[in-house]
Amino acid sequence: MKDVFPNSSVRYPVMMGLTLGLGIGLSVGAAWLVSQWEASRRQAQFQQQIENLSTALQRSLNRYTDVLTFLYDYYQVTEEPVSRQDFARFVARSLSTYPGIQALEWAPLVRQGDRATFEAKVQAEGYPNFEITELSTENRLQRAKERAEYIPVTYVAPFLNNEAALGYDLSSGATRAAAIAPARASGKIMATERIRLVQEPRDQFGFLVVLPLYSNGVVPPDQPTREAEFAGILLGVFRVADVVEEVLQPLSYEIDFALYDQNASSKRQFLGQYEAAGKSVVAGPTSLVQPHPAVCPRPADCTRLLTLGQRQWQVVFAPAAAYGLRRSYGAPLTLLTGLLLTGSLALFLHNLQAELVRTRQLGELKLRFFSMASHELRTPLSTILLSAESLREDMARSQTGPAQTKLDRILLTARHMGQQIADLLTLTRAEAGKLEFNPVLLDAVQFCQQVIDEVQPQVSQPLSFSHPPEPIKAFWDRRLGRSLLTNLLLNAANYSSSDSSIQVSLSSDREVATLTVQDFGRGIPTADLASIREAFQRGSNVGDRPGSGLGLAIVHTAVTLHRGTWHIDSVEGEGTGVTVQLPLE
């Protein structure tokens, strides 16, 4: 026998070396790719998380500035001047809902000539010591010096812990004035730089948001008119830590970040640092928040901007200590798996080399077996040839009688074997997903009549066919349809007595065609109905009737490919009816 693997003893070391080299190289490469994928996934996850945090922070800032907008709308729709009690009642809900509010205030514009009257009016409301104040150089409240106009805090809520703000001239402080002046000139909401909230029990920064009001109720179209009709300021004092902590309570990300005011008069101004470990904001950084290169290859990737009253706050994110950047085992596991597979392949090649020797020995045995088998097969083949010669001589003497019977028997057996081979091939192709489905437009009545005419000579029972007078147009696969109906008819004939009839009926509702084949033979036991559609399954009452058990499996395959349905109605000893419903399109 010719050697299938020539020079295998020489090629084996080379093959083993190539396998090990290629396997180790692929393992290292796969581990590197996995590490890159993990890094990319880690970066994408971190970016999504800081995007969620940024969105939550911006939403929180918007909610707090909206408080002033709602208060502004209240002033717009109120026909009478808003009293101190009305102001307190309206803002009570906001004060209870938003923990970051330090105070909400109303400060009207008071000109120098109206100062005395204004102060007397507020004193008459129950504040006998009220006066317009300002901070001295020693940072103490004192009576405001005379100037052309004042913007004193007149309403403040809550009043508790904010008593000192009552009467304070907002335009006297540089920080507040820096926001009031552009707000007054533009009609837009403005925020201040950070302020230190000395009255707070915890150390944190705050910020102010101001919204101007005008005497005619709307923002005038030009700056001179806005200056002339300016009526006062609505002001909110908010605490940075409380504004941030409130919105981050539901988010459990192990991410630290620092807040900076980008528009501060000095260099970038620190506002607070959120520490994920304690879920709190501190006014002084315990450690500088720096973007981590593992999740932020560029520092800008970990930076976001928030908008607050024409100002921008910068947020710098970094993973906290508990974020778990080093918990990555994909690359080592990939490398280990690759090395194990390489080792397994090398072991397989080693075993294959040993198997080659046994293959040569088996090849020699196979050669001897075929030599012997070919000799043994000559005897039955000679018998078949002699029978064929005898059949030919018989047919030469007479066209009827024994020779014709032999010929009919051979043809019947050949057709039966051909049908079985076709059925096996159909099922095999169907299981492999390679069975072709080629529907064509045909007349279902003519098609069924043609199949019945082909089957009638093969069975002894009469086949009757009932159908509507008009044609039934359908898109069916001819080959599968013929196999379906042929198997149903042959099954019915095989398990029925020779003198009983087999009834075939076809009907249609313009969408689905219904084909029924009814026999009056042995029927199928109830216990066998569940499995009778499977290949090589036959009823327990078939007795000595020949059959392969493929017929109903072929029917099921053909119906499924046509997107149809079918069911069997059978009573043992009374007969079987198979109903098939196939879509016309």
Image: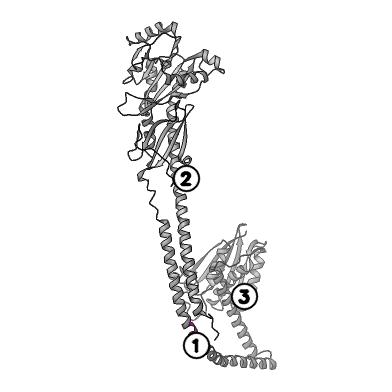
Q: Which dot marks residue 297? A: 2
**Of circles 3 and 2, which is in front?**
2
Q: Amino acid at mark 3?
A: Val
- Mark 1, residues whose alpha carbon is within 10 Å: few (<14), some, or many (≥20)? few
Instruction: Tell me the magenta residue range.
Output: 359-370
Query: What SS does tag 2 mark?
Result: loop
Q: Earlier in the sequence, mark 3 or mark 2?
A: 2
Residue 534 % position (x, y): 49, 70
For the residues labelled 1 and 3, the Cα–Cα distance comes to 48 Å
Please give the residue where the numbered disc 1 appears in the rendered image. Answer: 365
Query: What SS does tag 3 mark?
Result: helix
Q: Earlier in the sequence, mark 2 or mark 1?
A: 2
- Tell me, yes or no, whether the highlighted magenta stretch contains residue 361: yes
**Of circles 1 and 3, which is in front?**
1
Residue 69 % position (x, y): 46, 24
Query: What SS does tag 1 mark?
Result: helix
Q: Residue at x 33, y 16 (%)?
A: 140
Q: Is residue 536 left or right of residue 154?
A: right
Corner quadrant of residue 146: top left
Please give the residue where the numbered disc 3 appears in the rendered image. Answer: 455
- Mark 2, residues whose alpha carbon is within 10 Å: few (<14), some, or many (≥20)? few
Most frequent secondary structure within the magenta stretch:
helix
**Of circles 2 and 1, which is in front?**
2
Corner quadrant of residue 175: top left
Q: Nearer the viewer, residue 290 or 54?
A: 290
Q: Amino acid at mark 2?
A: Pro
Task: Tell whether label 2 touches label 3 (CB within 8 Å).
Answer: no
Q: Earlier in the sequence, mark 1 or mark 3?
A: 1
Corner quadrant of residue 191: top left
